[in-house]
Image (spheres, helix red, strand yellow):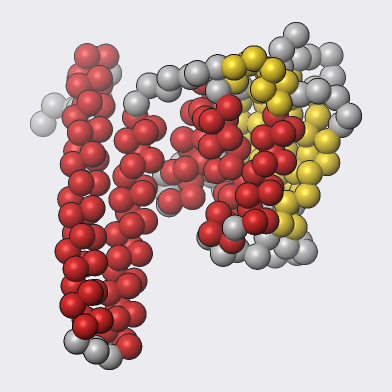
């Protein structure tokens, strides 16, 4: 048997494989949505028939699982497509992070019902640049949610986030502190729903000219500021 690696190194083959994979994922997502529709119909039939509680619980778990799987596939489809930025000038990173913290505090569904809060420590300096505010908010929100899931058990239930300007450079640094150390990079992993979203977040950050890092119980994002 001939080795596959030399063949896959051909750029045209890789691009074709990527397009095919994206289409397969998209089709799987549609199939899952179809299964969810049938499961929802079945739940309505069970409700009318006064079925036992354990049967209703089972069908509800099935629908939740289908929802989660379809959501993961949607994220993978988004990850596989080119990022199209709609940049605006003077977008304030501090304002975005405060909005993320407020959304978590106001609606528990935004944190998956995790009992977590975010405290933000920021320097009294403007941290503005040319960003796509919607996509940057999506990225920072996904990272914040991932940080909540990775919070150390020694912490008090509050995620500490710091924002500052890197010395002598036009870069903003956003850091999430007090997290469990991981044996892999959550920004380069597809090991689960949270890390799929964080990998997409890293791609969005990089599309803005930024970078992501992890280590020492901290997640870090660097973004270019307007000079």
Residue at horizontal 76%, vertical 24%?
A: 127
Residue displayed at 55% across by 23% down: 132
Which is more toward the observer, 214 or 206? 206
In the rendered view, tell whether residue 5 sits above or below residue 75: above
Task: Assign the N terminus to one quadrant of the image.
Answer: top left
In the image, 44: left or right of 174?
A: left
Give the x, y percent position of residue 53.
Answer: 32, 88
Quarter of the image where the C terminus is located: top right
Looking at the picture, does residue 109 appear above or below residue 28? below
Q: Residue at x 66, y 31 (%)?
A: 221
Identify the residue at the far front of this view.
48
In this rendering, the answer to whether 114 lies above or below 143 is: below
At 20% from the left and 46% from the top, the residue drawn is 30
- Residue positioned most to the left: 1
Q: Is residue 8 visible?
A: no
Where residue 173 appears, x then y in whole percent? 74, 29
- Where is residue 190? Give x, y as percent: 42, 44
Quadrant location of residue 65? bottom left
Q: Is residue 220 left or right of residue 46?
A: right
Residue 27 in picture, x, y percent from top left = 18, 41
Number of dots carrying numbers: 0
Query: Does residue 9 appear in this view?
Result: yes
Farthest-out residue, top: 227
Of 69 and 12, the residue lying toward us: 69
Q: Left or right: 58 with respect to 210?
A: left
Closer to the camera in the image, 24 or 39? 39
């Amino acid at each position: 048997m001939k080795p596959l690696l030399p063949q896959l190194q051909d750029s045209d083959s890789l691009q074709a494989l990527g397009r095919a994979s994206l289409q397969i994922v998209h089709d799987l997502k549609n199939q899952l949505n179809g299964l969810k529709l049938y499961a929802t119909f079945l739940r309505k039939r069970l409700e009318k028939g006064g079925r036992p509680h354990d049967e209703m619980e089972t069908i509800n778990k099935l629908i939740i699982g289908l929802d989660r799987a379809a959501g993961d596939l949607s994220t993978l489809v988004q990850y596989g497509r080119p990022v199209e930025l709609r940049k605006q000038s003077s977008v304030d990173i501090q304002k975005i992070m405060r909005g993320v913290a407020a959304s978590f505090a106001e609606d528990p569904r935004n944190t998956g019902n995790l009992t977590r809060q975010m405290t933000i420590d920021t320097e009294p300096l403007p941290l503005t640049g040319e960003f796509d505010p919607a996509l940057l908010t999506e990225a920072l929100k996904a990272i914040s949610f991932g940080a909540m899931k990775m919070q150390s058990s020694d912490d008090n239930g509050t995620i500490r986030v710091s924002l500052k300007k890197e010395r002598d450079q036009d870069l903003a640094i956003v850091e999430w502190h007090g997290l469990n150390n991981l044996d892999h990079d959550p920004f380069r992993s597809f090991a689960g729903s949270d890390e799929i979203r964080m990998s997409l977040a890293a791609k969005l950050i990089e599309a803005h000219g930024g970078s992501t890092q992890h280590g020492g119980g901290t997640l870090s994002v660097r973004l270019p500021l307007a000079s």
